[in-house]
Amino acid sequence: MTDPLIPLAPGSLSGKTALVTGSSRGIGADTARYFAQAGADVVINYRNKAPRAEKLAAQLRESGVEVLVVGADLTDAESVQAMFSEVEQAFGSLDILVLNASGGMESGMGEEYALRLNRDAQLQVLDAALPLLSDGSRVVFVTSHQAHFIRTTPTMPEYVPVALSKRAGEDALRERIPELDARGIGFVVVSGDMIEGTITATLLERANPGAIASRRESAGKLYNVGEFAAEVAHAAVDPIPPANTRLVGDTTSFEGE
């Protein structure tokens, strides 16, 4: 039986390198931790919380792996390119790319920010990573049921702009599947319900008090950060699922696409 705190077998990723965007905290941090536990060298990416990223890196190095910490604004092409230049210099190649960073509910960022981050930046990161990815590597895009099913199932008004932008990002990435397949690069979308303890859940609860409890009651269970991160980690190594989609948690409340 798999230990929920160590979802991937120790040593199973030895010799591999994984980059997780937005990995200084939350789902990204736990995903990076699971990769390190499995023996992978890890790239921790953060936007503006260097001390937090460095603290995580110190913890992961105790697993005996190499850890590179790189700050980058994913909406800035030069910043993204500089990050992958550091990755290439440090490791030479990349085996796993997890597109975890997202946002759009932050205050004062402007209406277009969600689309720039959740669609444009995702493509920008993929394009910059492609020269380092090769046959057998894997790209994982992390999203939510509220975004994945937004075209058929309404969501909370406060989350609609983010949901639409994340779905746009998913669609744009899916258009790249034939190209990725031709290179031998696997692609998986991991979609989950609201995740207890995430920044998004906190912001939604602030904007719509009771939203999380209501969704928990409807779904029966909501995954916590560590549990969902384990699913993301598995998506990086398990066989490609049907329709390139790994659905995590209850989907009975959501209509099919």
Image (cartoon, rainbow, N blue to C red):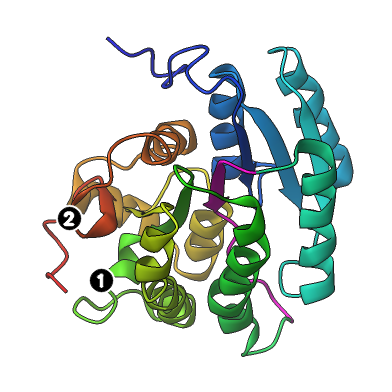
Residue 96 lies within the magenta run: yes
Q: Position of residue 89 (x, y in %)?
A: 85, 44
Q: Disc 2 and disc 1: Cα gap in Å?
A: 9 Å
Classify 172 as above or below 59.
below
The percent coordinates of residue 97 (x first, y second) are 56, 49
Q: Main secondary structure of the magenta part?
A: loop
Residue plotted at (82% across, 29% down):
55
Q: Residue at x 62, y 89 (%)?
A: 112
Q: In the rendered structure, which disc, 2 or 1, sits on the residue that comes first in sequence?
A: 1
Q: 180 left or right of 16? A: left
* Amino acid, disc 2: Thr
Residue range in magenta is: 94-108
The residue at the far right in this view is 51
Nearer to me, 114 or 181: 181
Disc sitting over residue 251 in the figure = 2
Residue 149: mark in rendering: 1
Vertical relation: 237 (above or below) 65: below
Total numbered labels? 2
Which quarter of the picture shows residue 233? top left
Determine contact: label 2, label 1, CB under 8 Å.
yes
> Image point 77% across, 30% down: which residue?
67
- The residue drawn where x is 49% and y is 76% is 162
Decide whether residue 193 is among the magenta residues.
no
Q: Quadrant of residue 96?
A: top right
Picture coordinates of residue 58, whole percent (x, y): 81, 23
